[in-house]
Image: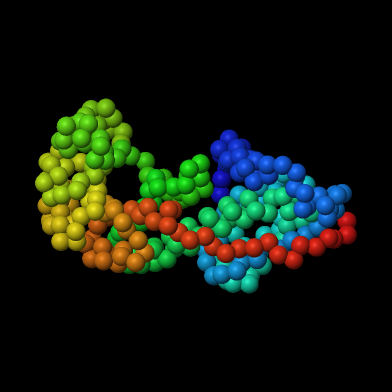
């Protein structure tokens, strides 16, 4: 859940931008059937099993349109929900409910889809020491919604290494720039780079798009002298092949760029008596 400061400074402007993108002119359909304010209710219904996430953003979307909107939730972020489950009732001016519906559902479906996919991948790592990480492969302007964990540290990728002149030079320069403050992570693509990274004293070594055989050999070379992360085309379908290596982290861009949305709807909209 976002705290009040983050909500106002970082989240609200993004939601408002999404609303402006969706509501570009008069909603003729809504205004033609509802020319005057009228109190109504609509139910938030889950249409498939999954992990719900983004209820605060869903609510905030309506609140930014009309602070008088009232929402009663029957679920909370992180809950496992089932097809057909009623997760909330939204009460307010029917015109506001109709105007905010699409944007609110877009956020909720996307965030719940990512949470559901991530939950499935995490279950595959259960019982191992390997921790799951996400990446920066997020939708533009939606990172704050899509990232559930932010890794603090310096990551030296291939272009950083190329600019510095090599793995050893890059690690040395990073340590000089930020001594005692950050852990230095180096992305490597072959066993020669692995050896350089170990000799240079990297804190974390990322094995990027390496074969299973090379990753196993890399683990022998590293020998516990650094934490090890695996990255590169890691998906729900192939992550099980990595668990036998004993790596510390697995990062997967698929968590945010390939998770399907979760099917959720607002149903049974009807007027109510004040």
Instruction: Name the quadrant containing residue 17.
Output: top right
Say whether residue 195 is left or right of residue 269: left
x and y percentages locating residue 107 in the rendered image: 58, 52
Instruction: Name the quadrant containing residue 245.
Output: bottom left
> Up-down: is 95 above or below 3?
below
Give whichever of 69, 139 is nearer the camera: 139
x and y percentages locating residue 3 in the rendered image: 57, 43
Give whichever of 121, 164 is nearer the camera: 164
x and y percentages locating residue 56 in the rendered image: 61, 51
* Residue drawn 59% across the image and 59% down it: 76
* Residue drawn 31% across the image and 63% down it: 239
* Residue drawn 21% across the image and 36% down it: 161
Q: Is residue 193 visible?
A: yes
> Up-down: is 209 above or below 117?
above
Q: Quadrant of the C terminus?
A: bottom right
The number of discs equals: 0
> Which residue is outermost to the top?
177
Q: Is residue 15 visible?
A: no
Give whichever of 202, 190 is nearer the camera: 190
* Residue drawn 16% across the image and 32% down it: 165
Say whether residue 20 is left or right of residue 95: left
The image's colouring method is rainbow
């Amino acid at each position: 859940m976002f705290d009040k400061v983050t909500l106002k400074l970082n989240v609200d402007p993004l939601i408002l931008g999404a609303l402006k993108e969706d509501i570009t002119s008069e909603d003729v359909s809504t205004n033609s059937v509802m020319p005057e304010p009228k109190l109504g209710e609509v139910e938030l219904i889950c249409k498939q099993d999954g992990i719900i996430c983004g209820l605060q953003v869903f609510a905030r979307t309506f609140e930014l349109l009309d602070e008088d909107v009232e929402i009663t939730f029957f679920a909370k972020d992180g809950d496992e929900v089932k097809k057909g489950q009623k997760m909330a009732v939204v009460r307010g001016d029917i015109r506001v409910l109709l105007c905010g519906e699409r944007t609110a559902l877009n956020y909720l479906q996307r965030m719940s889809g990512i949470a559901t996919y991530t939950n499935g991948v995490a279950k595959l790592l259960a019982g191992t020491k390997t921790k799951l990480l996400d990446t920066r492969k997020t939708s533009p302007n939606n990172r704050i919604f899509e990232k559930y964990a932010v890794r603090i540290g310096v990551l030296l990728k291939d272009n950083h290494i190329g600019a510095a002149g090599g793995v050893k030079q890059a690690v040395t320069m990073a340590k000089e720039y930020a001594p005692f403050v950050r852990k230095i992570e180096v992305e490597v693509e072959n066993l020669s780079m692995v050896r350089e990274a170990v000799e240079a004293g990297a804190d974390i070594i990322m094995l990027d798009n390496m074969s299973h055989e090379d990753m196993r050999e890399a683990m022998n070379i590293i020998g516990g002298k650094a934490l090890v992360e695996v990255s590169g085309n890691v998906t729900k379908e192939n992550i099980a092949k990595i668990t036998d290596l004993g790596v510390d982290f697995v990062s997967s861009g698929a968590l945010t760029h390939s998770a399907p949305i979760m099917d959720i709807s607002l149903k049974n909209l009807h007027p109510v008596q004040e």
